[in-house]
Image (cartoon, grey):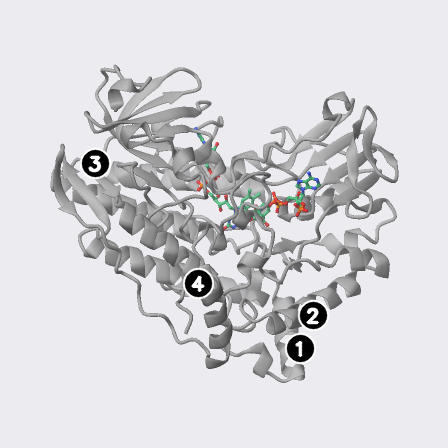
């Protein structure tokens, strides 16, 4: 139905691939395709490279995965010439790294900045994507690769009266490039997710007074940030290739000493010693403490209580400590935060915590924020209110596949993909770290590298065999969606009102979007699919179907599941209709 598309009639020659987004995913995709001789371009809404690290310039922004692991491994030269200054690099350094990558591989000559893709329609007759930008440019490409980011579109959250407010409003996700000095100001911040938890200690140290508006507390672990400990650097430097391979061969794409022992089988003293050791190490290390905390509520409670104790140790007012302690979701079911001095910030005399559950936010006034209990006056307000995650950037493009079908309609009940890489009815459209892939549950750089390399191999295979298009079959897509549900259902993850579930955006379908089976398992599946001549995909040469594989059979064998957890897993899968009742 391309003839009815508003985007037809362009006579320019199509390029091989148009990549949308110049974050780490788009940059590596461009470099990779160029190296393979494919004519590729990038379109980026921002004025520079770096994606997340270009937009999120709020004070305190830094990685929550160690920099030795959160960095590219695809080029040994790049790897050996870059030395991170800290264990968890701050945003300015990450942005410098992105700039360095762009310069080193001369990427910018093929990136058009300040340009947002508004629409992309598949032309079924010409087998190309017709793309239009908000700036009115038209482009044609054989393959469209969305490297648009899982966390790149802030939620549309607004508050009554916000337009009447006379002070300055800043969003953590759209921070001014020139920075903000809060010295001498009364500041309010809405939100207590990772962005807020990183920025609050620094804003508090500058401002006269900081008021934190909290609706839901989160779990946060200390980063113990600083120079990279010699032992860590030496372990990495001995053999960076082997180190990276080991990181990629994990569930989360980073090393956290995953332990096979069950908390519920471990003596209390040994549990405490293990949790203390991991807390002292810092960051996400505690997530790997016991194999049952992500499945068994009893095991999870043990870690919850440990972290609650750590919050009480850090916050001198017990009532404030209690308010800062999560009670509505199991530990690890929202992405935990990694902080530097967050809890201790609430001991400062110039910091106040407002519990929005007890005194709901009424709206903005010309002078500040009003809750049901009080009017707060502010010179500036910071919104750290989160993202329309995983689907937000894709949804905002008027994306139409075969027969003019809109992606929004295809995803009306939640995002449906095959492998988180392709969508049935949308030929030659690839999503880097798309919904249905491990993405946000992992060290994203490793997930990005795996996706980019899989897509590049796929395009080479098509080109070598003079194949025009590849499309996920509806059957394989349905089977993958079922597998995504099977992977998460045994865990506690769906129990939180998280952005993984779409719960932070009113009206968004509730569905656990990332693939929870682990990056290692997922990579194996993707490799098997490709090795089986792209099973589950329909491949065409012009209009001629060359390969019509409908099935998805590549589940790798499951690892051994501790016998004790089996009844919980079976019960959850049965209740979800994913396993027949006995
Ligand atoms: P992005 O970096 O989001 O880049 C996508 C780009 O696409 C953006 O520049 C955007 O402008 C552009 N774009 C989107 N739509 C369009 C359009 N229609 N037209 C043109 N351009 C478009 N992950 C980790 O693993 N570890 C961390 O420590 C970590 N910290 C994070 C901290 C913050 C504050 C945030 C928000 C996320 C963090 N993440 C982290 C996730 C992070 O998004 C990824 O690690 C990674 O940077 C994603 O790279 P990307 O290229 O896929 O997407
Ligand atoms: P977030 O985790 O979604 O947090 C948003 C916060 O805003 C929540 O506390 C939320 O409260 C609150 N909020 C939203 N709407 C509100 C409203 N109308 N009224 C009051 N409060 C409201 O977003 P984020 O902090 O930007 O983090 C998103 C993700 O980005 C993270 O989970 C992480 O993956 C990544 N990130 C990582 C780092 C890092 O450490 N490297 C830093 C920043 C971000 P409720 O919970 O009650 O909805």
The C terminus, quarter of image: bottom left
- On residue 306, the disc is 2
Could you say which disc has been placed on residue 62 in the image?
none
* Other residues around mark 3 within 10 Å, as few (<14) / some (14–19) / many (≥20): few
In terms of sequence position, does the residue under pointer 4 or pointer 1 come before the other? 4
The residue wearing badge 1 is 272
Q: State the residue at coordinates (40%, 66%).
A: 579
How far across and down, in percent of the image, does residue 525 sit? Answer: 30, 59
Residue drawn at 36 percent across, 46 percent down: 417
> Sequence order check: which comes first, mark 2 or mark 4?
4
- Going from N to C along the chain, the mark reached first, 4 or 3, is 3
Query: Looking at the picture, how far across and down is residue 107, in whole percent?
Result: 36, 33
Report the mark closest to the observer, 4 or 3: 4
Q: Is residue 563 left or right of residue 75?
A: right
Taking depth in this image into account, of 206 and 251 the one nearest to the observer is 251
The Cα atoms of the two marked residues, 4 and 3, are separated by: 33 Å
Q: Specify the label residue 37 is tagged with.
A: 3
Q: Nearer the viewer, residue 161 or 337?
A: 161
How far apart marks 3 and 2 lie (CA) works out to: 54 Å
Comes first in the chain, label 2 or label 1: 1
In what element is the residue under mark 1? helix
Tag 3 or tag 1, which sits nearer the N-term? Answer: 3
Give above or below for 85 relative to 17. below
Q: CA distance from mark 2 to mark 4?
A: 24 Å
Q: Is residue 516 visible?
A: yes
Report the image quarter containing ligand 2.
Answer: top right
> SS at mark 4?
loop
Q: Is mark 4 within 8 Å of ligand 1?
A: no
In the orientation shown, which residue stands out farthest toward the front? 582
Badge 1: how crowded within 10 Å, few (<14), some, or many (20+)? some
């Amino acid at each position: 139905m391309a003839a009815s598309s508003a985007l037809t009639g362009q006579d320019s020659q199509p390029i091989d691939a148009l990549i949308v987004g110049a974050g780490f995913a788009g940059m590596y995709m461009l470099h990779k395709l160029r190296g393979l001789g494919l004519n590729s371009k990038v379109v980026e809404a921002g004025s520079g490279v770096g994606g997340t690290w270009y937009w999120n310039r709020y004070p305190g922004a830094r990685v929550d995965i160690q920099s030795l692991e959160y960095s590219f491994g695809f080029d040994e030269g790049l790897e050996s010439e870059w030395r991170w200054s800290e264990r968890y690099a701050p945003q300015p350094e990450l942005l410098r790294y992105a700039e360095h990558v762009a310069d080193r591989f001369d990427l910018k000559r093929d990136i058009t900045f300040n340009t947002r893709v508004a629409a992309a329609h598949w032309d079924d007759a010409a087998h190309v994507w017709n793309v239009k930008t908000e700036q009115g440019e038209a482009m044609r490409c054989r393959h469209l690769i969305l490297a648009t980011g899982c966390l790149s579109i802030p939620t549309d959250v607004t508050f009554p009266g916000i337009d009447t407010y006379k002070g300055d409003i800043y969003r953590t996700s759209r921070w001014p490039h020139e920075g903000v000095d809060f010295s001498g100001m009364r500041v309010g911040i809405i939100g207590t997710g990772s962005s807020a938890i990183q920025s609050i200690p620094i804003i508090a140290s500058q401002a006269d007074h900081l008021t934190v508006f909290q609706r839901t507390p989160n779990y946060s672990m200390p980063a113990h940030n600083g120079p990279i400990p010699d032992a860590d650097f030496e372990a990495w430097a001995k053999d960076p290739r082997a180190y990276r391979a080991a990181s990629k061969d994990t569930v989360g794409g980073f090393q956290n000493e995953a332990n096979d022992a069950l908390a519920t089988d471990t003596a209390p003293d040994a549990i405490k010693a293990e949790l203390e050791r991991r807390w002292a190490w810092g960051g996400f290390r505690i997530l790997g403490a016991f194999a049952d905390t992500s499945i068994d509520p009893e095991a999870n409670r043990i870690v919850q209580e440990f972290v609650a104790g750590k919050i009480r140790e850090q916050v001198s007012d017990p009532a404030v400590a209690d308010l800062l302690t999560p009670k509505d979701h199991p530990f690890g079911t929202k992405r935990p935060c990694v902080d530097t001095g967050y809890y201790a910030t609430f001991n400062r005399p110039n910091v106040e915590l407002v519990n929005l559950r007890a005194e709901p936010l009424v709206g903005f006034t010309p002078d500040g924020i009003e809750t049901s209990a009080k009017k707060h006056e502010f010179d500036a307000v910071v919104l750290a209110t989160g993202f329309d995650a995983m689907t937000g950037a894709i949804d905002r493009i008027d994306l139409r596949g075969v027969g003019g079908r809109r992606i929004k309609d295809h995803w009306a009940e939640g995002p449906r993909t095959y492998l988180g890489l392709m969508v049935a009815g949308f030929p030659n459209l690839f999503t880097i770290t798309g919904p249905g892939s491990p993405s946000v549950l992992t060290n994203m750089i490793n997930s990005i590298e795996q996706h980019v390399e899989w897509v590049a191999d796929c395009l080479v295979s098509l080109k070598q065999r003079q194949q025009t298009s590849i499309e996920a079959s509806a059957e394989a897509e349905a089977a993958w969606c079922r597998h995504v549900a099977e992977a998460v259902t045994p865990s506690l993850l769906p129990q939180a009102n998280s952005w993984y579930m779409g719960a932070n955006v009113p009206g968004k379908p509730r569905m656990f979007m990332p693939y929870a089976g682990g990056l290692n398992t997922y990579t194996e599946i993707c490799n098997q699919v490709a090795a089986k001549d792209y099973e589950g995909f329909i491949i065409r040469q012009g209009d001629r179907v060359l390969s019509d594989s409908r099935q998805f059979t590549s589940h790798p064998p499951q690892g051994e599941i501790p016998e004790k957890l089996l009844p919980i897993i079976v019960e959850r899968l049965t209740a979800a209709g994913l396993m027949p009742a006995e």
